[in-house]
Image (cartoon, rainbow, N blue to C red):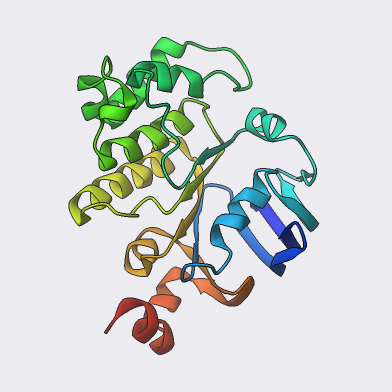
């Protein structure tokens, strides 16, 4: 069953239309990726899900329509967003950044327990918890963005270009943790990514976008075998 589903989704900034009626879904407990070159509309798709851009069409989360809902409402429903560019509060410590992630979540529960949980996934953040967020490396800031989203206890995690500008080893580690979270906590994931090899290795379903339209979709394993995708995006 689909946890998140978009039908005929359009989005625009001012007069400029960016998404031209796209359909996609994220299965409950699944990992879906949206691939595409720069400017394809991938980040706008995540912004549309989060209520950060004007939309038409339909977005449903856990069976209810969420278009037009305030971003804070969507956070309370359990949609966590790790944005492109990390979104670190540079003057706050790592731990303060993480505590902010728990601020808007639904339900109570122990923030201290959740800190232990995310430090278990990201031991490097535990070592740096008293440091200002701005002093972290790019890879550590990306880990912090994912960890902050996890403090929400999300049902759905939106990841925007987690590999951007990072060394392959760091990317591999971040995606290994995302896979673990998906398996052990049943957190569904929508991953937006330019690096097709990384994304298709992680996801079970994939959509390829070009200039605001979905031009191909299917199981990630099938797209990985597709000759056109191999040549254009995988380089072999």
Can you give x and y, in whole percent of width and height, for residue 171 in the image? 27, 51
Judged left or right of residue 24, residue 204 is left
| Residue that appears at 43% across and 43% down | 182
Q: Residue at x 26, y 26 (%)?
A: 125
Quick check: 134 above or below 215?
above
User: Which residue occupies the foreground of this view, 109 or 97?
Assistant: 97
Question: How far across and down, in percent of the image, does residue 117 sit?
Answer: 35, 23
> Where is 119 relative to 57, above or below?
above
Where 22 sits versus 13, above or below?
Answer: below
Name which quarter of the figure residue 122 lies in.
top left
Q: Residue at x 44, y 77 (%)?
A: 223
Query: Which residue is most to the front?
Result: 15
In depth, the one of 234 and 5 nearer the eye is: 234
Judged left or right of residue 24, residue 95 is left
Dividing the image into 4 quarters, which one contains the C terminus? bottom left
Image location (x, y in percent) of residue 50: 65, 43
Q: Is residue 123 left or right of residue 157?
A: left
């Amino acid at each position: 069953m689909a946890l998140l589903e978009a039908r005929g989704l359009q989005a625009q900034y001012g007069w400029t239309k960016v998404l031209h009626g796209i359909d996609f879904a994220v299965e409950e407990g699944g990992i879906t990726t949206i691939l595409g070159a720069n400017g394809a509309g991938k980040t706008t798709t995540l912004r549309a899900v989060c209520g950060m851009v004007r939309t038409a069409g339909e977005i449903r989360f856990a069976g209810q329509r969420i278009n037009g809902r305030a971003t804070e409402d969507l956070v309370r429903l359990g949609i966590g967003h790790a944005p492109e560019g990390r979104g670190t509060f540079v003057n706050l410590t790592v731990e303060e950044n993480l505590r902010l992630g728990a601020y808007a979540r639904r339900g109570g529960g122990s923030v201290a327990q959740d800190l232990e949980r995310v430090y278990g996934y990201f031991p490097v953040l535990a070592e740096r918890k008293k440091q200002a967020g701005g002093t972290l490396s790019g890879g550590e800031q990306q880990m912090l963005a994912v960890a902050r989203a996890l403090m929400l206890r999300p049902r759905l995690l939106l990841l925007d270009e987690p590999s951007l500008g990072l060394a392959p080893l760091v990317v591999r580690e971040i995606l290994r943790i995302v896979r673990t979270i998906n398996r052990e906590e049943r957190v569904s994931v929508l991953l937006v990514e330019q690096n097709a090899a990384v994304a298709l290795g992680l996801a079970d379903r994939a959509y390829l976008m070009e200039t605001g339209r979905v031009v191909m979709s299917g199981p990630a394993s099938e797209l990985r075998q597709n000759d056109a995708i191999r040549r254009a995006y995988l380089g072999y």
